[in-house]
Amino acid sequence: MTSIFEKLQKIVGIDSVTNNEYVRYCYSKTGDCIYQELPDFVIRPRTSEEISDILHIANKEEIPVVPRGGGAGLFGGAVPHYKGIVIDMTSMNKIIEINIEDQVVTAECGITWAELNTELLKKGFYTGAMGPGSGMSAVIGGGLSHNSVGGGGGAKYGSVCRHVVGLEVVLPQGDIINTGSLCSKYVKEPFSRYGFGPDFSGIFLGDNGIYGIKTNATLRIYPKPPFYEAKTFVLKRSNMKYGVKIFLEWLNKGGFGIYDGFYFPDYFVMGMSAMDPPTYFPWKKMTKAAIFYTTEAFSERELEANIESLDEIVIKNKGQPLGPQIEDGNFAKFQYPFELNGNYSFYQNTFGIPKGSQSLSTEAHCPIKRFPEIINAIDKWGAKNANDFAKIQEKTGIPAGTGCGSVGLSGENNVELAIGFVTSPDPELRELNLNLWKEQMATVIKAGAMHYMLGYIASRELVKTGAFTDQYYNFMKGIKKLLDPNNILSPGKFMLEMGDKK
Ligand SMILES: Cc1cc2nc3c(=O)[nH]c(=O)nc-3n(C[C@H](O)[C@H](O)[C@H](O)COP(=O)(O)OP(=O)(O)OC[C@H]3O[C@@H](n4cnc5c(N)ncnc54)[C@H](O)[C@@H]3O)c2cc1C
């Protein structure tokens, strides 16, 4: 009888599937490093048809399948919690078409955000939202499955999902569909997401890979404005309400071309100063909160007007501008993706500060006016668990602690809070780390904020904390049952366990 491995080899060829232990080990974790499970097979398809064939086998044999992009997720989403097959999407990394007339790009979902934008920038365009800070390794399929947003246009463009025009998706039972205008046989090009009935792109966005495997995506592209400014201010008063006031005034008085806007609580700035960190945190002498903006414009005149309006609002709220250079503390420059290798290099370098540490994230969104309330809830939670953080520090020497690192304007009307905690990856601390992580997540959820990249852990905590109403959760489960009756795709997420066909 032909084994499953041989059947998979037949689909993709002997070089693109493996059951070697050392390769499987490489696919057993994601960026969070807490969850680990070895898959039985790792496979790298090159076409949607190959993925369809893999899913046919998986259904027949009832083997779980987990899609994996860059593996830079921070919530265990691409870990094969039920073993089975990991589908590595990174061989599907071609740009299919850059269509300047229709202002769209179509690319395979295994291309990284950095690669895609490098090609677009050669033509003077970008994807608007430049993907997550991990965009040098994270791919577009991962970002679209996570509702990703970060610096790199978060304020102006919001989540990457907002720019989707259409998708090609392989459904869990192997059917291949196109969403958006290409669902009609008569339409020649992907140009609009909406029109032919319900927006079915939406169910595959932020789905964390439970409803289908996205194989290619058409995204809106935008001309990149040639002028920009990046400015950082310290806020004389550290009270967070000044951060709220400045953000709201910036937006409600016109937005002024803001590309990114970030607020850093005082304790974060002080903590970073105390650690004497590398150039990525040049604010060595700062002891107060900080705020920055980057703004873009199509002419110098427009840029000057933006700067004048944005500065006026900060200065009115007792903000003090820092000098223009990184050495002056102008940290904003690191956030503009087209300077100094941009926000990708910033984020990829900040993970692991302090040396040898592990950051466990519970990032979430909330309305601008409520961010101080959410941060206070987290600080209170941190104080309650101070003994555990002290224990970690004592055992490992790593300055463990928790809080909110930054508050970034996102999607024009809300903010993303970079909440999480710093700990040690020491395996002996796994249980403690896991408990703290889940507890902090529950605190964020119950404080009324919204996680956006969910992966395994956050999707389960949402269900466990009772965040979803029964009606809503039943609706989600109903769609899952319809699309994936054997629950082979990404089992375990949202507490949808394999073998549970209810
Ligand atoms: C240094 C660093 C910085 C980061 N900065 C940000 C940030 O600014 N903003 C942000 O949002 N996140 C950030 N992240 C988290 C994470 O990298 C992003 O969410 C990223 O979008 C994940 O993409 P990936 O390709 O690595 O996905 P993976 O981790 O491989 O997968 C993520 C999820 O998507 C599913 N999936 C992957 N591809 C597909 C597909 N084709 N079809 C269906 N499902 C699929 C997986 O099963 C998994 O559940 C950061 C992480 C790191 C390590």
Image: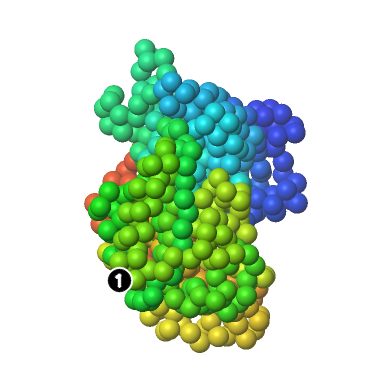
- Asked if the beta carbon under badge 1 is closer than 8 A to the nearest atom of ligand 1, the reply is no
Q: Nearer the viewer, residue 141 or 34?
A: 141
Provide residue 235's location: percent of width, then percent of height: 39, 71
Residue 42 visible (yes or no)? yes
Whether residue 185 sits left or right of residue 39 in the image: it is: left
The residue carrying pointer 1 sits among few (fewer than 14), some (14 to 19) or many (20 or more) residues within 10 Å by Cα, namely: some
Q: How many marks?
A: 1
Q: Nearer the viewer, residue 3 or 390?
A: 390
Placement of 146 over or under 122, stated as above or below: below
Task: Identify the residue at horizontal 62%, vertical 68% (top origin).
Answer: 353
Q: Residue furthest top?
A: 186
Q: Nearer the viewer, residue 388 or 107?
A: 107
Q: Quadrant of residue 92?
A: top right
Q: Which quadrant does the N terminus fall into? A: top right
What residue is disc 1 on? 241
Whether residue 404 sits left or right of residue 46 in the image: it is: left
Provide residue 161's location: percent of width, then percent of height: 40, 41
Q: Secondary structure at mark 1?
A: helix
Provide residue 437's location: percent of width, then percent of height: 48, 70
Figure coloring: rainbow
Task: Identify the residue at horizontal 38%, vertical 52% (top origin).
Answer: 307
Type of residue at label 1? Lys
Q: Nearer the viewer, residue 61 or 487?
A: 487
Task: Identify the residue at horizontal 40%, vertical 78% (top origin).
Answer: 379
Q: Quadrant of residue 381?
A: bottom left
Task: Identify the residue at horizontal 32%, vertical 60% (top origin).
Answer: 312
